[in-house]
Image (tube, rainbow, N blue to C red):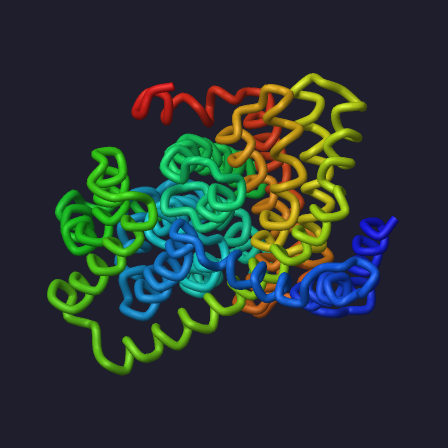
């Protein structure tokens, strides 16, 4: 009964417009202070601090720093130009540039919102100048940003690994093929739209010398994911250590290769990183306190029993979880949703035979699609602000891209081999 009241209090605060972190923290704090519960007053403080005392979680602020540093130092511009020289001559070329640039940038940022904020303005302005409608440019930018959290380094996958006590390296490897397939699916959708709507073909293909010049200029940045993945696969460093190595590497190439790093940029990057990290960590801490209260009331066990009573078939359970996650993604930010729901859904699905690495990919992909869905889709509102376009117009254009994105979600759900093939080949079963 008390567990039900906890959930009810959380939902009520959300409906009243309270921030998610407040909606999570307040019912949990009230629960810990109730004399009838008999919990020591220090439990809440211990839970909050223990939830953040995690070595894998240290990768999150480091990857945030990498993405912010790349934005401020102009590395994103170089990456965009590489993508432009490769595919801009296709019909609807700038649309393909948008997708390829998101894939390239995702190898360093690891977050959908970083992609929207870092490349969004550049991509949208370029498409506007080429004659594309602002709402279409904004919708495509938001859709292509779902690639970032799947390709290493992925902040959501690291958080899932931390909460689920799964292998972060396996999860990061598992996200590579889904990210590439998503990019391909979006490019197919754009190619069909280009013919249907009569998008213009770009200029003639870039000269080989120009392509090589741009690749050479961006090569140090392009090597970032290569160094990161190679280091983890070789066992030189863990996923968390990889984040620290990536920070040092980006600092070095910004300062000594591109010679753009100044004290002003470093201060601005540090402030933005601290601000974003505080938001993420507050969410993790509040969600951890809330899930601890639910655990004491045995809500996860009840939810697990409910799920297993519906079916013991892994596919059926995955479809049920997808429905729950899609609903949660409409209201919750992805970090809080991962911390809140992972302890509830992982035990019954693993018990039913679902691989936790496969489950992590499905969970994160589902929640990234949730960033594009109203009423609280953060990518949707951020890209609307970046593109200076009303949300309702962006949403109308975005509906076209729901088809490949939801299609990929179903493919990843029904075919776990897509997620598990690369980790098993590289690290063994």
Is residue 262 shown left or right of residue 378? left
412, 318: nearer the viewer? 318
Q: In this view, does 320 lie above or below 146?
A: above
On screen, residue 83 versus residue 129, left or right, reads: left
Coordinates of residue 349 in the picture (x, y in percent): 63, 27
Report whether residue 79 is seen: yes
Residue drawn at x 56%, y 54% is 335
The residue sitting at 64% across, 48% down in the picture is: 370
Where is residue 1 shown, x and y percent of the image? Answer: 88, 48
Residue 103 position, x and y percent, is 38, 45
> Which residue is nearer to you in this view: 299 or 264?
299
Residue at 58% from the left image edge and 43% from the top image edge:
197
Residue displayed at 68% across by 56% down: 290
Query: Residue 67's image quarter?
Result: bottom left
Asked if residue 205 shows in the view, the reply is no
Q: In which quarter of the image is the C terminus?
A: top left
Residue found at the very far bottom of the displayed protein = 264
Return the residue nearer the eye: 196 or 17.
17
Q: Residue 371: x and y, percent?
A: 61, 52
């Amino acid at each position: 009964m008390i567990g039900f009241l906890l959930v009810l209090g959380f939902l009520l605060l959300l409906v009243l417009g309270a921030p998610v972190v407040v909606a999570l923290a307040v019912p949990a704090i009230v629960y810990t202070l109730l004399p009838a519960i008999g919990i020591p007053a220090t439990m809440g403080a211990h839970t909050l601090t223990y939830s953040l005392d995690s070595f894998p979680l240290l990768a999150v602020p480091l990857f945030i720093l990498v993405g912010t540093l790349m934005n401020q130092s102009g590395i994103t511009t170089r990456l965009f130009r590489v993508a432009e020289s490769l595919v801009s001559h296709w019909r609807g070329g700038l649309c393909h540039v948008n997708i390829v640039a998101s894939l390239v940038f995702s190898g360093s940022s690891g977050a959908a919102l970083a992609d929207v904020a870092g490349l969004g303005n550049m991509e949208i302005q370029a498409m506007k100048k080429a004659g594309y409608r602002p709402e279409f440019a904004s919708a495509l930018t938001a859709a292509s940003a779902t690639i970032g959290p799947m390709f290493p380094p992925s902040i959501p996958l690291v958080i899932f690994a931390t909460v689920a006590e799964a292998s972060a390296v396996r999860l990061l490897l598992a996200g590579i093929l889904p990210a590439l397939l998503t990019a391909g699916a979006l490019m197919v959708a754009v190619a069909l739209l280009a013919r249907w709507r009569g998008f213009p073909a770009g200029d003639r293909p870039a000269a080989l010398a120009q392509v090589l010049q741009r690749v050479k200029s961006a090569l140090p940045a392009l090597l970032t994911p290569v160094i990161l993945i190679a280091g983890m696969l070789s066992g030189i460093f863990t996923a968390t250590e990889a984040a620290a190595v990536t920070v040092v590497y980006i600092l070095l190439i910004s300062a000594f290769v591109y010679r753009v790093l100044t004290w002003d940029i470093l201060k601005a990057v540090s402030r933005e990183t601290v601000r974003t990290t505080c938001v993420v960590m507050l969410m993790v801490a509040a969600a951890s306190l809330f899930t601890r209260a639910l655990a004491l009331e045995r809500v996860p066990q009840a939810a697990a029993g409910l799920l297993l009573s519906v079916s013991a078939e892994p596919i059926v359970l995955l479809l049920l979880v997808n429905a729950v996650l899609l609903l949660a993604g409409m209201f919750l930010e992805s970090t809080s949703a991962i911390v809140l729901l992972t302890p509830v859904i992982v035990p019954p699905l693993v018990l039913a035979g679902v691989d936790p690495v496969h489950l992590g990919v499905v969970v994160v992909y589902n929640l990234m699609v949730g960033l594009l869905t109203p009423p609280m889709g953060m990518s949707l509102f951020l890209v609307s602000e970046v593109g200076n376009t009303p949300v309702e117009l962006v949403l109308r254009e975005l509906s076209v891209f729901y088809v490949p994105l939801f299609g990929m979600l179903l493919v990843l759900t029904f075919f776990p081999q897509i997620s598990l093939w690369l980790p098993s080949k590289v690290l063994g079963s």
